Amino acid sequence: MIQRPLWLSLVKHAWSRRSVVWLSGVRRVGKTTLARMLPDAVYMNCDLPSAARALEDPELFFGGQRPGGIVVLDEVHQLRDPSRLLKIAADEFPRLKILATGSSTLAATGKFHDSLAGRKAAIHLYPVLWEECPEPFGVPGLDRRLLHGGLPDALLSEERPEAFFAEWIDSFYARDILELFSIRNRHGFLLLLRLLLRWSGGQVDYTRLSRLTELSRPTVKSYLEALQIAHAVHLLRPFHSGGLREIVSRPRCYAFDTGFVAFERGWNRIREDDRGVLWEHLVFDALRLRHIDDRIFYWRDKSGREIDFVVRRGRDRVDVFECKINPDRLDPSRVNAFRSRYPEGDNYVVSPRAKQPYRMRRGERVFTVCTTRDLP
């Protein structure tokens, strides 16, 4: 078992703001294991008919709990009316601490008639972060995390679990996509998912995806929205100020886990050239943990110069994050091009080799070199 104290502290902090915490994340990411780490919690597996019967009368159930106690409602979307249950808990029993879990965002299905705005705090549980890995430094530990991915079962497997990845994709469609979104075109949907995994980190080309999947452009966009809601992919918007030389509309698509990217690319070992694009995924997860999604972008101009990640920190301040396995290979020309337009902000090089943060100068620019653990 991988201990995840970071996420337990986030849950406890969220309870200081709201009595109901919504913990979401992809299948097998460890939501149930995390919930069971909470001491003295009343655990309800909402997949079970017995749990559904116990929760049919929310007033009776919550009224029978110890004041200040913790109640876990695992896979709460399986219930007939989960939003009503959580609303009653938030409004009538605010002294209870409720942790509700699911594979997607709260309003993914028609069962949720209320988004619980103002009543809940939301936490998105990511695959095991690089800073959570027991071997934080060194190529062997990094390659294992990149190749196996961050779902605990796969990461802890001695051999790369090929069957696990294939089974997960089938289960994801059957248990999440079919149940939550009623998408019946299994072949077209899974073909789209596999293409997005294979091309993860690249720009989205809807026309090409439509042609290769034989789905219409509106259908591709609809399926892509479902994948985002289910946390399987994330679209990263380009940063721009409307300049004629900047990319302004085409997002980049990142898959949720490096193991699935490597699996769909047919990689059974990590070569030196493979590490860069997969390390970028781990940095992206670390940034999303620290910043709301609406403040994270990438930047690219029409000359092909590109910044891996840009974080808006204020009205005029934007921080730059370049992902490098070897920070000595940084090319500052791309940052110089960006800073000619947006001069205010800090520059970071994020590297797994940086045991401690340090600063380096490249031309007129100063960069802070750090690993994901030390990101601001």
Image (cartoon, rainbow, N blue to C red):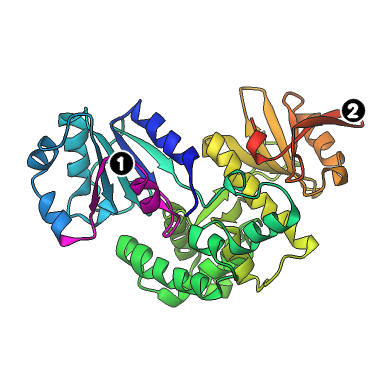
What residue is drawn where x is 24% and y is 57%? 78
Residue wearing tag 1: 99
Residue 358's place in the image compared with 52, above or below, is above
What residue is drawn where x is 40% and y is 69%? 171
| Figure quadrant of residue 262 | bottom right
In terms of secondary structure, where does tag 1 sit? Answer: strand
| Figure quadrant of residue 353 | top right
Magenta segment: does it hold 48?
yes
Is 272 on the left or on the right of 195, as rendered? Answer: right
- Per the model, the C-alpha gap separating discs 2 and 1 is 49 Å
Residue 252 x, y percent position in the rendering = 62, 52
Residue 181 x, y percent position in the rendering = 33, 61
**Mark 2 or mark 1, which has the lower sequence index?**
1
Q: Residue 364 carries which label?
A: 2
Q: Do the residues labelled 2 and 1 touch (CB within 8 Å)?
A: no
Question: Residue 311 or 13: which is nearer the viewer?
Answer: 13
What residue is drawn where x is 15% and y is 37%? 65
Residue 215 x, y percent position in the rendering = 49, 71
Magenta residue span: 24-49
Question: Residue 189 or 286: which is nearer the viewer?
Answer: 286
Task: Judge the density around disc 1: few (<14), some (14-19), many (≥20) Cα neighbours within 10 Å.
Answer: many
